Image (cartoon, rainbow, N blue to C red):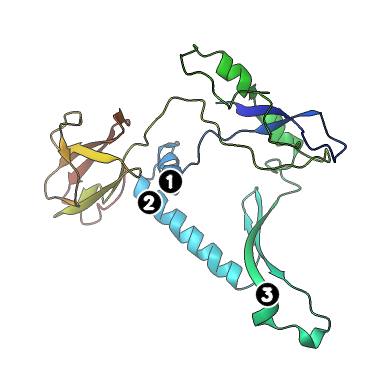
């Protein structure tokens, strides 16, 4: 999927950028924490989703701990996380009160300035491909209610440009050019066990989850998930999330009973 760009005109007549057209990155969705961990487990990884989720949780907790100890945390080649405060001024140093003048503590991120994966580097631009949202919308078959307000240069009131063009730069509206989709269910629990294993299934808000344990493909007619499942024999679990009549992809995993005492790994 290319980086989607929305072209809009600066409507702020108090800036030098007034009347010019600028491009902004458009988000297609917000990826949830669990979806990211699921993607990690499926992205040429030997570790299962639960392991990725556990590592991510540990990393998050350790980063917060170190930040609260006054340390900056380097996050790979992307950049550095650090804390900053917002405070009101005092006329004299001795008048400054930490409990009164400190108004907020904020988590900040500074992109790397040296590595090739630097978020502010031209190297990242060279790795990306771009598509104008207007072209994407116009390339799709028109429907009776195709009067979307998200297409291209439609006179949007989102003023300003990107970069250092001097224009104001409010956050762009989220555009979802793809058909409505539902995230697939996420499983937890050891995939190998000696006696039994407990499995929980989670899904997107507002969706119902239906599952099977006989290898068949789950549908809206299958058993609806309500509480954790316990398996004492090798079982193939499949589940689907359904929301507003739209079904997700099927999540499938085999939970295997083994005689190995150390066989408590993940897919």
Q: Earlier in the sequence, mark 2 or mark 3?
A: 2
Please state which of the two labelled residues, at mark 2 or mark 3, is closer to the viewer. 3
Mark 3, residue position: 102
Say which residue appears at 40% left-offset and 51% top-offset. 53
Q: Residue at x 25, y 50 (%)?
A: 200
Query: What residue is shown with label 1?
Result: 37
Dividing the picture into quadrants, the one containing residue 131 is top right
Q: Compared to 261, does 256 lie above or below? A: above
Mark 2 Cα shell of 10 Å, populated few (<14), some (14-19), many (≥20): many
User: Where in the figure is residue 116, as x and y percent of width and height?
Assistant: 71, 40
Residue 206 coordinates in the image, percent (x, y):
32, 43
In terms of depth relative to the viewer, which is nearer, 257 or 242? 242
Answer whether labels 2 and 3 touch (C-beta < 8 Å): no
SS at mark 3?
strand
Indicate the quadrant where residue 220 lies.
top left
The answer to whether the residues at label 1 and label 3 have Cβ atoms under 8 Å apart is no
Q: Which residue is mark 2?
A: 51
Binning the other alpha carbons within 10 Å of mark 3 as few (below 14), some (14 to 19) or many (20 upward) gives some
> Looking at the image, is 173 positioned above or below residue 205?
above
Find residue 152 and report its horizontal and vertical position in percent. Answer: 64, 23
For residue 51, side relative to residue 215 (left or right): right
Query: What distance separates the C-alpha of mark 2 from that of mark 1?
Result: 9 Å
**Residue at the image point whose x is 65% and y is 42% from the top:** 171
Circle nearer the viewer, 2 or 1: 1
Tell me which label, 2 or 1, sits earlier in the chain.
Answer: 1
């Amino acid at each position: 999927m290319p980086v989607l760009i929305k072209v809009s005109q600066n409507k702020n007549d108090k800036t030098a950028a007034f009347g010019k057209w600028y491009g902004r990155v458009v988000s297609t969705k917000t990826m949830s924490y669990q979806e990211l961990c699921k993607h990690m487990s499926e992205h040429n990884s030997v570790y299962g989703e639960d392991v990725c989720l556990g590592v991510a949780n540990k990393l998050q907790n350790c980063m917060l701990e170190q930040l609260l100890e006054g340390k900056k945390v380097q996050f790979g080649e992307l950049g550095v996380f650090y804390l900053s405060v917002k405070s009101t001024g005092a006329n004299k140093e001795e008048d400054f009160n930490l409990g009164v003048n400190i108004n907020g503590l904020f988590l900040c991120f500074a992109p790397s300035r040296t590595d090739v994966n630097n978020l502010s580097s031209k190297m990242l631009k060279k790795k990306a491909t771009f598509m104008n949202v207007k072209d994407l919308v116009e390339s799709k078959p028109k429907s009776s209610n195709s009067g979307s307000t998200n297409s291209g240069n439609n006179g949007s009131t989102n003023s300003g440009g990107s970069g250092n063009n001097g224009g104001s730069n409010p956050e762009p509206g989220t555009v979802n050019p793809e058909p409505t989709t539902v995230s697939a269910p996420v499983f937890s629990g050891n995939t190998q066990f000696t006696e039994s294993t407990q499995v929980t299934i989670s899904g997107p808000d507002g969706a119902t989850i239906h599952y099977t344990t006989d290898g068949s493909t789950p549908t809206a007619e299958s058993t609806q998930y309500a509480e954790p499942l316990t398996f004492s024999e090798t079982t193939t679990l499949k589940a689907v999330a359904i929301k507003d009549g739209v079904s997700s992809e099927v999540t499938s995993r085999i939970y295997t009973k083994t005689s190995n005492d150390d066989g408590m790994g993940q897919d």
